[in-house]
Image (tube, coloured by chain):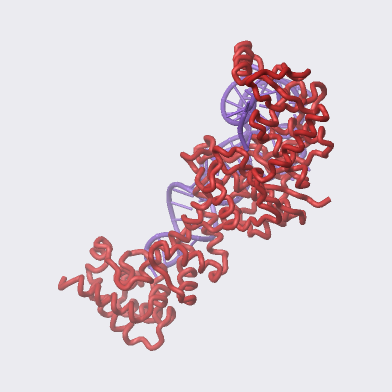
Amino acid sequence: MTVVTRFAPSPTGMLHVGGVRTALFSWLYARRTGGKFILRVEDTDRERSTEEAVRVILEGMTWLGLAADEGPYYQTQRFDRYRAVIAQMLAAGQAYHCYCTKEELEAVRAEQMARKEKPRYPGTCRAGGTPRAGVEPVVRFRNPQDGAVVVEDLVHGTVTFQNAELDDLIIARSDGTPTYNFCVVVDDMDMGVTHVIRGDDHLNNTPRQMNMLLALGATPPTYAHVPMILGPDGAKLSKRHGAVSVLQYEEEGYLPDALLNYLVRLGWARGDQEVFTREEMIAAFDIRDVNKAASAFNPEKLLWLNQQHMMHAEPAALVPHLRAQLRRLGLDSDNQVLLEGIILAQRERAKTMKEMALNSRFFFVETVEIDPKAAAKHFAGGGKETLIRVRERLAALGDWNAASVHGALNALAAELGAGLGKVAQPVRVAVTGTAVSPPIDLTLGLLGRERTLARIDAALRSAGGG
RNA sequence: GCUCCCUUCGUCUAGAGGCCCAGGACAUAGCCCUCUCAAGGCUGUAACACGGGUUCGAAUCCCGUAGGGAGCGCCA
């Protein structure tokens, strides 16, 4: 049997890392087993669903490279089908009309709570409700009253629910629209979903859904309820910490593969391996190995992993990411050699592509502004004189590349009887404006002779007569 | 309140009765390397929630307790 998984987000909020991780698990499981991955947008709550949220879901999935084999389906486009199934269940006696009003039910609930009982529908209309003037009935599913439902969950193991604990849930509102638990059941059945991978906040819904599936003559899928992701402080993920749109990670300069790698390791591991390529993840992942406990989102580790991916990636593959970040700064270049050179020089000193772009601005601007503190430290005490001599040597260089620059600076340092630092720092400040940059030879090699000399001249002028 | 779920270093995790006075990673501290910053290497601090069992032997099995979470909606 071919595995069919699905990701079914509801567009009532931003797609955040929690949703992305369940999507990732579903996608990985499908890829791993050679199955099919479906995207389904659960937009039956028309008041809270937004176009914007749908857009983030679609763009986010694309950015992450979690392509769906089928879909996106929209539940709002399947209302006819839901209505037909409801009619069928009504006719078969598997569902019934309930004329109780919200007010009455709320009163009952309050009493039950006062008596410290589990609030539940008392079954007033189960034996046959009486139509009342002015009351549009809802439709309830006739849940079995005896026996138990056993969920063989792939991550939690066997979980048993007594039917006596379950009441008759509403599957259609008084305005005729179907409710969530019912739509899920019909969709999973119609779409041939074999494995439902979702957040464990749905574990309690599972027995009801299974009962409906059974009533409809369908075989319930296999379930896997994965733990939630907590904020960095261990509290539930909310807008206040961590729960930002996935697209925000793109803006911040994270690589999709790094985010995915981080997320897959939240609740799952294979021995001691930390860094996974997409292919390695697919080859190693099994939903059965996912942990049961919730885990806290750790931004520092994500940062570390992002850098790991930056360092392991082909420089050419990072060029589009660098350019995208440069454009955000109002800079750009199509010089492939320069861009790849910068990536090679900067990737071990930046944790995100955004940071890399920020640190590389001096390669793309005409003139740099020199940090006064850096100037004070490195142009004083002979620094300026050193700079003059460096300029002479560099101007006289035949070939201009990292190796020749390296040779010239080293030779000068040796002649001065000083460490390379004495020579490199003044130059670094002059050409980059700060005391921090990639190795000086690489930096000058990429910058080019013209700009290097011009910046040294400018620095010399600004350093004045002192 | 009731039902269901969960519990190894600050964080993510390895661990499926002896290999564990608990291993790796992030973070953190120190050292090394070094033209700056990094990256990298080495070393350190740091955990089996608690209490009972079962067993020759338990982080691993069982039962409680505590703590956390979810559900109990004409939300998804």
Q: With A423 as the anchor, is A269 left or right in this view?
A: right
Q: With A161 as the anchor, is A441 left or right in this view?
A: left
- Tag count in the figure? 0
Where residue B47 sits: x, y (%)? 58, 35
With respect to residue A15, does A370 lie above or below? below
In the rendered image, which quarter is residue A419 located in? bottom left
Q: Colour of chain B?
A: purple
With respect to residue A103, does A368 lie above or below? below
Q: Colour of chain A?
A: red
Residue at horizontal 41%, vertical 87%?
A399
Where residue A83 sits: x, y (%)? 72, 37
A18 or B51, nearer to the observer: A18
Residue at horizontal 36%, vertical 86%?
A397
A146 or B63, nearer to the observer: A146
Where residue A243 sits: x, y (%)? 51, 43
**Looking at the rendering, in which quadrant would you find the C terminus of chain A?**
bottom left
Residue at horizontal 15%, vertical 73%?
A465
A307 or A333, nearer to the observer: A333
Q: Residue furthest left?
A: A465
- Residue A427 in sight from this viewpoint: no
